Image: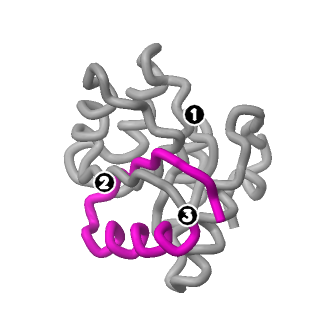
Amino acid sequence: MVVSKNIYLADDDTDDHFIFGAALEEICDDYTLTIISSGDELLTTLRTPGVRNPDIVFLDINMPRKNGIETLKVIKEDPKINSLQIVMYSTSSNPLYISQAQQAGACSYFVKPNDFSKLKQLLLKTLSIDWGSYNVPANRQEFIIN
């Protein structure tokens, strides 16, 4: 089990919200999950005074208005929030998206699995990483959590 975490999920798909939350419930003893439906909403939330920064942000790539890569770039340009741990969270394993995420400053890339038990396994692996001492791998294969 993973200990207390403050987790943000930025994803516009309500089915993914439910599945992600259900997986967290099974692997975490104590967590706070904040669900955000767009890149703009994520930026507004992160910049709101008094809001506790998340330990980790799972950021979907394919969202309306401002996609995940665009949102990531804005986060990394803002000195108040640029140190956040951002894991790109997508159904796509497109090498272009992975490369863009890596270049824009994501910590890692997480391909959404179709299998619930695999999702739990990947979330447990991701949430168990000591992000404070983590060095983003230069190798694309190591950048992807699998």
Instruction: Give the quadrant of residue 2.
Output: bottom right
Q: Tell me the kind of residue under disc 1.
A: Gly
- Which residue lies at the image location 52% right of the left edge and 83% below the top edge? 116
Write down the region rendered in magenta.
Answer: 1-27
**As rendered, which of 43 and 8 lies closer to the eye?**
8
Q: Is residue 113 above or below residue 62?
A: below
Residue 117 relative to residue 41: left or right: right
SS label for mark 2: strand
Asked if marks 1 and 2 touch (Cβ < 8 Å), the reply is no
**As rendered, which of 92 and 40 lies closer to the eye?**
40
SS label for mark 3: loop
Q: Tell me the kind of residue under disc 3.
A: Cys
Instruction: Give the quadrant of residue 53.
Output: top left
Residue highlighted by disc 3: 28
Residue highlighted by disc 1: 105
Residue 44 relative to residue 143: left or right: left
- Which residue lies at the image location 52% right of the left edge and 43% below the top edge? 56
Q: Tell me the kind of residue under disc 2.
A: Ile
Residue 106 x/y as whole percent: 57, 40
- Which residue lies at the image location 60% right of the left edge and 36% below the top edge? 103
